[in-house]
Image: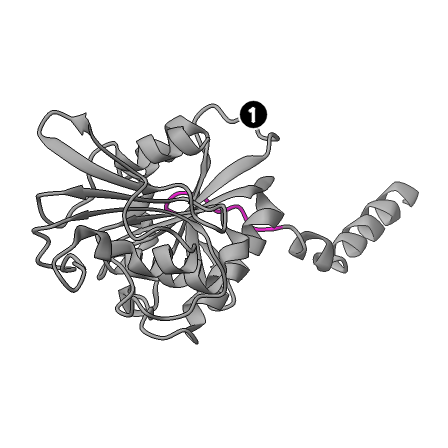
Amino acid sequence: MKNILAFLAALVAISLSPTVLATEPVNCELDVPCELNGRSFHARTPDGWDGKSPLPVLIHFHGWGRQGKLIMNHGRIAGATRKMGVLLLAPNGQGRSWNFWTADTDDVQFTNEMLDEAAKRWPIDRSKVFVSGYSYGSAMAWRYACAEPSRINTLLAVSGSTPDQDEQCAGPVNVRHVHGTRDNVMDYPFGPNGEVEGAVSLWRTMNVCNTSADEKSVWQAVKILKFERLRWNNCNTGKTVTLDVHKRGHFIPRFWIENQLKELL
């Protein structure tokens, strides 16, 4: 009889203590989104991670009409982070898009909350947080870098930028931007006289860089696509601005994100 009573008492104790379990984060990764204050994001840890070492982070904003779930298996995005030992975070935009048009967008605050939530779930390295995006997502990455430069190490932008190259950002940041001069979706932002340098004029101003690039070179990751690289590495703020220009259209160049992470890490 005593054993039965003890067993029943234990069951009652468990049933009256749900808050213990409720404080544990619900497992979420890959196709299972992490829920956060009515919104959500997706995450993927890199291949071979030991489960405890601090992780660099790539925040990637999806393109228009997409969601973060797509990013989890994208060969040119997740393929890079899996190989380079980087935690991939892909927030879901409201209405499958982003509000990057003005500085007071809720998407910036949501991204801050996502990063803080991720830090509760995985041991992230705050000194190696990179923000990226493609198309509309690239414009959102610009917006986030402009609003929260102290939270990130480098902006990695692909085929998209802020609509206002003359706005004031909260501070300087390292920038790497790639764009095609024949892009007819997010048109290439040439300078007033057709200069390709116009694509990063905002960051050249914020970082107090020279008008002309300090270095120019040509490189390629695959045979069919060459990049003209312009780099400003003598900016007064100590930050670096890098622009990779190609002569094609609107896409994520193969191995571009992987090469940037390889150089940065």
- Residue 15: x %, y % from top left: 73, 57
Q: Bounds of the magenta span?
A: 25-31
- Residue 151: x %, y % from top left: 54, 54
Q: Is residue 131 left or right of residue 49?
A: left
Q: Quadrant of residue 55?
A: top right
Q: Is residue 30 one of those drawn in magenta?
A: yes
Q: Quadrant of the N terminus?
A: top right
- Residues 146 and 39: in front is 146
229 vs 211: above or below: above
Q: Which secondary structure, mark 1?
A: loop
- Residue 13: x %, y % from top left: 81, 54
8 vs 49: above or below: below
User: Magenta: predominant secondary structure element?
Assistant: loop
213 vs 168: above or below: above
Q: Quadrant of residue 91?
A: bottom left
Q: Is residue 141 visible?
A: no
Residue at x 92% of width, y 44% of height: 2
- Residue 90: x %, y % from top left: 39, 50
Residue at x 18% of width, y 37% of height: 228
110 vs 32: above or below: below
Q: Which residue is mark 1?
A: 50
- Residues 30 and 162: in front is 162
Q: How many marks?
A: 1
Q: Is residue 25 left or right of residue 227?
A: right
Q: Check disc 1 and give the amino acid type.
A: Asp
